Image (tube, rainbow, N blue to C red):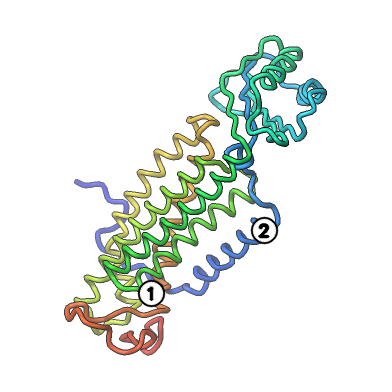
Amino acid sequence: MRLRLVREKTSFDFFRFWKVTFGASTLAVIASVLIFAVQGLNFGIDFRGGTTIRTDGAAEIDLAAWRAAIAPLGLGDVSITEVFDPGFDATRHVAMVRVQAQEGVEATSPEMIAAIETALRGVDPTITFPAVESVGPKVSGELVTSALIAVGLSLLGVMAYIWVRFEWQFAVGAVVALIHDVVLTIGIFSLFQIRFDLAIIAALLTIVGYSINDTVVVFDRVRENLIRFKQRALTEVLNLSINDTMSRTLMTSGTTLLALIIMLVLGGDVIRGFVFAMTWGIVVGTYSSVFVASQILVFLGVKRDWSKGGAAEGPSGTRFAGKDGNGA
């Protein structure tokens, strides 16, 4: 007896409420862009430049006393955030002290870091400093540029791959779905002001790879079914293909999410941002493969007879077996 998450044969109509699902995705993307435009991102030291000092002590953290101790050093914008983690025992208190990049200084000097540590030890003699990270303004600017280039090139590479393997309509659908995933991930980080650093860029690139893998599996089945069912409406072929691959999709996404949720709960604050981005990305990536990429195919149309290997018959808007783009 084999475990099945779904029946061997399913017949869900994924396009029955396409106006609702695609409309919700469109509104979510617009909302994410607006939130980003209003609030921006809570950039980490990687992108803003400055120094992050991680503290660990036995005494409870008095934020007002800490700020008063650091204020005489004249460091400008100093952010102190207490870190909460279910893995910490009751006597352990951890915080992150972030100091902005200093004017005309490429990186915070060891003397300044020592002065901060001395000031904090005056408040809590038990405090230790397990990690110190420092990034200069010039380096942080280069990292922002490199991150944008990396994400942009990954999207272009995906489009080229899908275009060569399938057709340009598939490539457009896949890239629109990827942009949907990336924009929604950035939007959720902007909404909750979760720290955005290089680890999140790595998560975004991983999401792109995971999402396109799921989309390619569906598209491959679509191409097979377009050869087998030349007279069926395009939405019927897409529904059949998505149902055929549903068990694989749920198994892959489910097992990945299981590991990510465990890491999210027990992994600690150091990797929590990365794991949260991955978890959110897996959810929206699976959703977009079904409800965004496939719907774009319905809008654009696809070649109906893949066995001939030539150009698709008719303009893209007429390549359907039904009367309209949704198989009516």
> Which residue matches tag 1?
297
Percent of width and height locating residue 41: 63, 48
Instruction: Kindly give the residue lying farthest to the front in the view shown.
Output: 104
Instruction: Kindly give the residue lying farthest to the top in the view shown.
Output: 125
Percent of width and height locating residue 228: 19, 76
| Residue drawn at the location 37% of the way across and 59% of the way down | 157
Separation of marks 2 and 1 at Cα, in angstroms: 30 Å
Which of the two residues, 18 or 144, is positioned nearer the viewer here? 144
| Residue drawn at the location 67% of the way across and 28% of the way down | 97
Q: Secondary structure at mark 1?
A: helix
> Which residue matches tag 2?
37
Which of the two residues, 293 or 40, is positioned nearer the viewer here? 40
Percent of width and height locating residue 239: 33, 71
Q: Amino acid at mark 2?
A: Ala
Quarter of the image with the C terminus is bottom left
Instruction: Classify 241 as above or below 67.
Output: below
Q: Amino acid at mark 1?
A: Leu
- Left or right: residue 273 compared with residue 111: left
| Residue drawn at the location 30% of the way across and 55% of the way down | 247
Badge 2 vs badge 1, beta-carbon distance below 8 Å: no
Q: For the residues carrying marks 2 and 1, which lies nearer the camera in this image?
A: 2
Quadrant in the rendering for residue 320: bottom left
